[in-house]
Amino acid sequence: NRILKRIFDICFSILFFCTFGLILFPLIALLIKLTSKGPIFFRQERWGLNNETLICYKFRTMVQNAEANGPQLSSAHDTRVTKIGRWLRKTRMDELPQFWNVLKGEMSVVGPRPHPTPMNLESMKSVDNYLKRHMVNPGITGWAQINGCRGEVRTHEEMEQRVNFDLYYIHRWSFTLDLQIILQTIIKMLRDKGAY
């Protein structure tokens, strides 16, 4: 099953880069450069398989040095988010560079979303079975995300709900479930408001 999932991840990522990526990446990069100062990509340490750290790539959606004083979760009307950044977050296109993480084998197309190190350190002490979500590679999208657990985490109960969705996915994984999640993610990209 892991070999099948890895083959699918590689094929899906290469297909993305050779089609949509060829058009979207230069366009998004240009828009970011024209509308705000700073790098095109945002890099952040997150936890992956077996609690090992990885550098997660995203298109930069905030002003330069937005996290100079440490990571902070974004919220509605966050002044750090740029105009193009708000659109990228709404459409989930800020996550597209993570297909590079997938090609490197650090992530999968589908799996539990990787959390930043401070969130992991806090949640592992307060949420039951939290670290079990790291038994598999993290994903660009996941079961929790298509079930409404996306964006700002406001309460302890919301984090527990996300972890429960992640564990449900891990224990019931199948190739068809991955395909279902990818299809529902695309539908939600077209319909939902997305994160802040």
Image: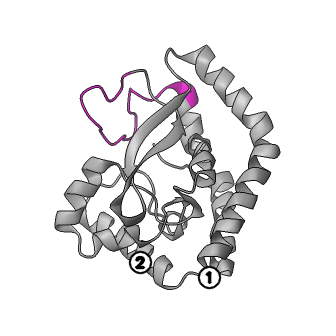
In the rendered image, residue 105, in percent from the top left (x then y), is placed at 57, 57
- The residue at the point 37 percent across, 66 percent down is 50
Identify the residue position indicated by label 1 in the image: 174
Rendered view: 138 above or below 39: below
Render colour scheme? one colour
Q: Which residues are magenta?
A: 65-84
Secondary element at tag 1:
loop
Which quadrant is the N terminus positioned in? bottom right
Q: Amino acid at mark 1?
A: Ser
Residue 161 covered by magenta stretch: no
In the image, is 27 to the left or to the right of 107? right
Does the rendering let one see residue 183? Answer: no
**Distance between mark 1 and mark 2 Cα atoms:** 13 Å
User: How many other residues sit within 10 Å of disc 2, few (<14), some (14-19) or many (≥20)?
Assistant: many
- The residue at the point 43 percent across, 51 percent down is 151
Residue situated in front as seen by the camera: 74 or 65: 65
Does the rendering let one see residue 157? Answer: yes
- The residue at the point 71 percent across, 67 percent down is 8
Taken as a whole, is the magenta stretch helix, strand or loop? loop
Rendered view: 122 above or below 68: below
Label 1 vs 2, first from the N-terminus: 2
Which quadrant is the C terminus positioned in? top left
Identify the residue position indicated by label 2 in the image: 167
Rendered view: 116 above or below 63: below
